Amino acid sequence: MNADILCIAPHPDDAELCCGGLLLKAKRAGKRVAIVDCTRGEMGTRGSVAERAKEAAAADRMLGTDARVNLKLRDGHLQDNDALREPLVHALRRFRPKVVLVPHWEDQHPDHAAVGRAAEAVAWLCGAPKYAPKSGQGVASSGHLPYRPDLVLYYQNRYGIEADLVVDISSVFEMKIALAGCYATQFGPGMQGAKRSKKEPLTKLSSEKFLTWFRALHAYYGFKIGVDYGEAYCLKGPLPVKQLGILLP
């Protein structure tokens, strides 16, 4: 299956939490969306691998995800090396997305930062047939340029990083809350389905303050573009504008 958008998530829940608004809008526009989870989230303070898998399935049903795979790499041990690059190159060749969403390369979480740092190399290497040749068939052919994604967007999950691009997600923001809330083991009261467990440690995500912070983060970026809620992304290099309608909505 060829995807229009591929979101690469270090852990199950990152795609929905960080990119849920863009993904929801893409599905409403009839686009094909795929998600690649790098790990099973086994290092998470709360919940289990089995619970996270069920939560991801629930989120997929709500979003209408066209395809989702888990690379089953070691949670908490991701590094920008071939052990990460090769399966990501394979995923890009499999889904051939036009747009790839990845974490910011300076993210606080080391797994996120590793995926973000690997992304630029992966987006180029997927078009080099002799790199990881088992999945290289068909990426280049006579008379056609090698397959590479048109755009890599780096998503954010904290303050302190200046956005290059903000997507208006006002129309789907409440649904994004519900989508993230499918991960009931991870998030605090107010997120749909989320419940605080007295048996597990309290985290920032599971605290009562999380929903307030979540709204404030999106309102902050929305304010920057004059809308209620926004989702922030960064780029390396200029943003290509192929249709004037993007500038003149």
Image: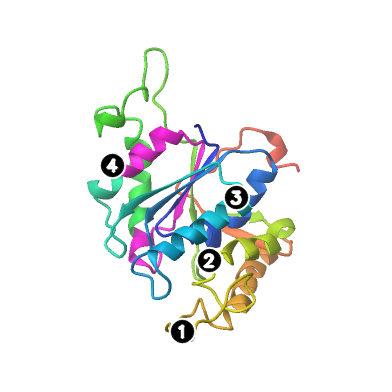
| Distance of label 3 from label 4 (alpha carbons) | 25 Å
**Does the magenta portion include 168?**
no
Q: Are marks 2 and 1 in contact (CB under 8 Å)?
A: no
Badge 3 or badge 2: first in the primary sequence: 3
How crowded pointer 3 is (Cα within 10 Å; few <14, some 14-19, many 20+) is rated as many
In the rendered view, would you say 214 is above or below 55? below
- Disc 4 marks which amino acid? Glu
The picture places residue 19, in percent across and down from the top left corner, at 55, 56
> Which element carries disc 4, helix, strand or loop?
helix
Q: Give x and y (percent) for residue 220.
A: 64, 69
Task: Identify which amino acid the numbered label 3 is placed on.
Answer: Leu
Who's the residue at 38% across and 63% down the image? 49
Above or below, 141 against 57 in this view is above
- State the residue position of label 4: 86
**Label 3 – label 1 distance at C-alpha:** 29 Å
Can you identify the residue that label 1 sits on?
A: 202
Q: Which residue in the structure is indicated by mark 2?
A: 183
Q: Which residue is mark 3?
A: 23
Q: Disc 4 versus disc 2: distance between alpha carbons? A: 28 Å
Instruction: Indicate the position of residue 125 as horizontal and vertical percent values.
Output: 32, 36
- Front position among marks 3 and 2: 2
